[in-house]
Amino acid sequence: MPSVAAFTTDEVRRLAHLARLELSSAELELFTRQLQDILAFAQQINAVDTSSGPAIPFIAGEARPGSLREDTVHPCLDRAEVLALAPEADRAAGLFKVPRVLNE
């Protein structure tokens, strides 16, 4: 199994920038170390031999019998009432206005 490359401080700094997080030097070092530990643990888990383990009784992505509840219809909130409570809403279009998240 190929080894997983460790996170570098520069990579964590880049991820923090993408997530719009401001990290102190101490936080940067802490998160770099924690991400390296997480990757090392994931690599340990991937190295475990599971070939002799029991077969999975269901296919991943499919529900087990009895694990899903029945769909039931519930009353919705009245759109006009909810829009009337919204601080900035386009009532004519029936839309909520939210602050811009991306600046690009």
Image (cartoon, helix red, strand yellow):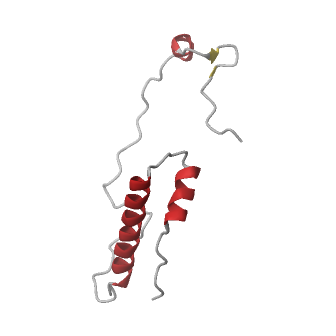
| Residue ID at (44%, 57%) | 28
| Residue ID at (49%, 64%) | 9
**Closer to us: 86 or 35:** 35
Q: x%, y% of residue 25? A: 44, 54
**Closer to us: 10 or 1:** 10
| Residue ID at (32%, 80%) | 55
Q: Is residue 25 above or below residue 79?
A: below
Q: x%, y% of residue 95? A: 64, 22
Q: Is residue 1 above or below residue 62?
A: below
Quarter of the image where one finds residue 49: bottom left
Q: x%, y% of residue 98? A: 60, 26
**Closer to us: 66 or 95:** 95
Q: Is residue 57 above or below residue 99?
A: below
**Closer to us: 102 or 54:** 102
Q: Residue furthest front?
A: 25
Q: Quadrant of the C terminus?
A: top right
Quarter of the image where one finds residue 80: top right
Q: x%, y% of residue 16? A: 52, 52
Q: Quadrant of the N terminus?
A: bottom left
**Number of numbered callouts drawn:** 0
| Residue ID at (32%, 84%) | 48
